[in-house]
Amino acid sequence: MKIRLPASLGLALPIIQGPFGGGLSTVTLTAAVTNAGGMGSYGAHMLEPDEIQQVTDGIRRETNGPFVMNLWVDSEDKRSREADADAFHREAAKLTDVYGRCGVALPTFPRRQPVDFERQAEAILKARPPVLSFVFGIPSKEILSQCRKLGIVTMGAATTLDEALAIEAAGVDIVIATGFEAGGHRPSFLRPAADSLHGTLALVRQVVESVRIPVVAAGGIADAVGVAAALSLGASAVQVGTAFLACEESGAAPVHRRMLFRSSARHTRLSDRVTGRLARFIVTSTLEALDSHDLTQLGYPVQGELTRSLKTVEDGLFYAGQGAPLLRHHTAAELTRDLASLIR
Ligand SMILES: Cc1cc2nc3c(=O)[nH]c(=O)nc-3n(C[C@H](O)[C@H](O)[C@H](O)COP(=O)(O)O)c2cc1C
């Protein structure tokens, strides 16, 4: 099989650990995957520029191999910018029963503003990680050409064929074709996410047939057979999220990691109620309650502050992809080696 990722990366295995935003990435997980021969990623979309530098330095201290820093090109909905404390507390009051059942206090209006993408991109250009990956759009021509000059490989996520073509046309090095089986947010940027629900099998094949740049397959891949299948479709590598999130090195709460291995993870659903943007979660009674409430959407990221405390409690809100029932490994090195076991 042809592994066509840039040779400059020196990647031993075509296995990329998907980045996790919202505090779920760790330097330890990123470095562990890279040290096992794959490529670790760090979700940095909530970090200030100086934190981006610190994390990049931290990963470099733990590994000499390739790694990815990840940003969201668009991380604030218009509705969220306009949401005020009154609107927030009105929505929180509607969920009083849910907070009560989970034993958490009503949240208060967030003070922290999303960090400006341009400032984060500047920090990336300064920190010079081997790879910058991004979701929810495409960085400007200037940023992409600076990356090229500095030798930073770029990877953009596509949820449709049109998005993949736009990513290629912009001069991005690699496209990540992300099927709707995936855990985390649906990072669509041309059409609404709810109208961009292509499965990995269909999407990867279409993208491979239509672009010349290397394609990474993501969504629902959680074992060696899945990896081999993705490479058979013509993908150059895979990006695996949920299976790495379940490893002990990830930043997920212990209750979240436990849930990923339970039979309840057999049933996941896309919902926009948790953060204001469509993302996949285990169906728990908390998610069902949230989905049934008449919430006025506050938009991302303010909506997410309504539910943040529900992500670390029993029967709470847990991100998961459809591949969860295949999970077996608890450490990143074991998982990386196993994922690659049929392609060596
Ligand atoms: C909890 C969670 C958070 C995620 N956050 C990000 C993110 O910030 N940026 C990104 O590019 N992808 C993010 N992803 C997507 C993963 O990087 C990866 O593409 C996806 O999980 C692959 O599908 P899988 O979960 O079925 O393996 C996230 C996934 C999960 C499960």
Image: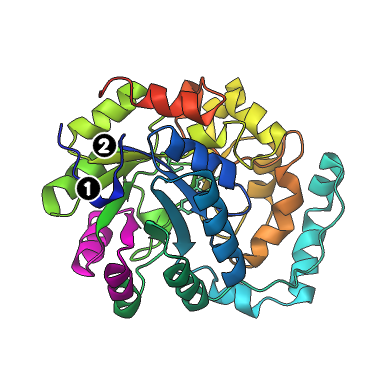
- Which amino acid type corresponds to the residue marked 2 in the rendered image? Leu
Quarter of the picture holding the N terminus: top left
Quarter of the picture holding the C terminus: top left
* Count of marks placed on residues: 2
Residue 101, numbered circle: none
Residue 144 in sight: yes
Q: Looking at the image, is mark 2 or mark 1 nearer the viewer?
A: 1
Q: Residues within 10 Å of mark 1 (few under 14, many from 20)?
A: few
Residue 124 x %, y %: 46, 68
Give the side of residue 259 with respect to residue 214, left or right: right
Q: Residues within 10 Å of mark 2 (few under 14, many from 20)?
A: some
Residue nearest the observer in this picture, 177 or 330:
330
Residue 152 x %, y %: 33, 62
Distance between the Cα atoms at labels 2 and 1? 26 Å
In the structure shown, which secondary structural element does the residue marked by tag 1 occupy? helix
Residue nearest the observer in this picture, 156 or 76:
156
Q: Residue at left 54%, top 49%?
A: 61
Q: Residue at left 41%, top 60%?
A: 135
Q: Is residue 173 above or below residue 14?
A: below
Which residue does the numbered mark 2 point to in the structure image? 201
Which residue does the numbered mark 1 point to in the structure image? 7
Residue 166 x %, y %: 24, 66
- Which amino acid type corresponds to the residue marked 1 in the rendered image? Ala
Residue 303 x %, y %: 66, 62
Q: For the residue with label 1, is its CB less than 8 Å from the closest atom of ligand 1?
A: no
Q: Residue at left 26%, top 63%?
A: 172
Give the side of residue 54 with respect to residue 313, left or right: left
Residue 48 in sight: no
